[in-house]
Amino acid sequence: MDDPLTKRRRLIQTAGAGGAALLAGCSGILDSQDGSDSEDGTDGDDGSDGDSGIESGDGDTREVGMVAEPDQQALSALQQELQSGNLTQQEAVQQQQEIIAKSIEDLKTVLSAETSIEVTEELPQLGALRVDGDPYELVDAMTADRVSALVPAGSLDVQQPTG
């Protein structure tokens, strides 16, 4: 059985913020805002068959996974307690889960207070949220201390425990 931090590490390793930003629809940020042809007279077609692997979202919002940043001091203190023998492995894992749960709650509070990003699912075993929102706001949310990473929403499904 993996501890919660191992699951989080795997999730973050599956996709970097750059890939998530593209999946969030942010690749269109560099395109013209009105969707018209570019000024150089080209139609933007690069000659490829159109299957770049980038999934374009529908409408003005995108869905991504947002990984919460746990309190690093609390995790360090927990590790010291475990190493000194003051906690069993099971107690340490339980406290680790509580630290991660608090980081998710803190992130939800920040998102609710400062953005229009909607939380559609909580994934405490991964320390992540499935969120839906404006691509610009999703990228801007990366500046919050409470956000560790943006990952493709599909990565959250792959990382779900099987039993």
Image (cartoon, rainbow, N blue to C red):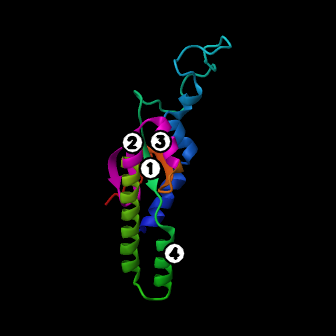
Q: Residue furthest right?
A: 40
Which residue is denoted by mark 2 in the rendering?
Answer: 117
Between the C-alphas of marks 3 and 4, the distance is 29 Å
Q: Earlier in the sequence, mark 1 or mark 2?
A: 1
Q: Residue furthest front?
A: 113
Is 128 displayed left or right of 18 in the figure? left
Disc 3 crowd rating (10 Å Cα; few below 14, some 14-19, many 20+) is many
Residue pictured at 55% horizontal, 23% vertical:
50
Residue type highlighted by circle 4: Ser
Q: Earlier in the sequence, mark 1 or mark 3?
A: 1
Which residue is denoted by mark 4 in the rendering?
Answer: 76
Mark number for residue 138? 3
| Residue 82 screen position, x and y as percent | 46, 83
Res. 62 visible in picture: yes
Q: Which secondary structure, mark 3?
A: helix
Q: Earlier in the sequence, mark 2 or mark 4?
A: 4
Between the C-alphas of marks 1 and 3, the distance is 9 Å
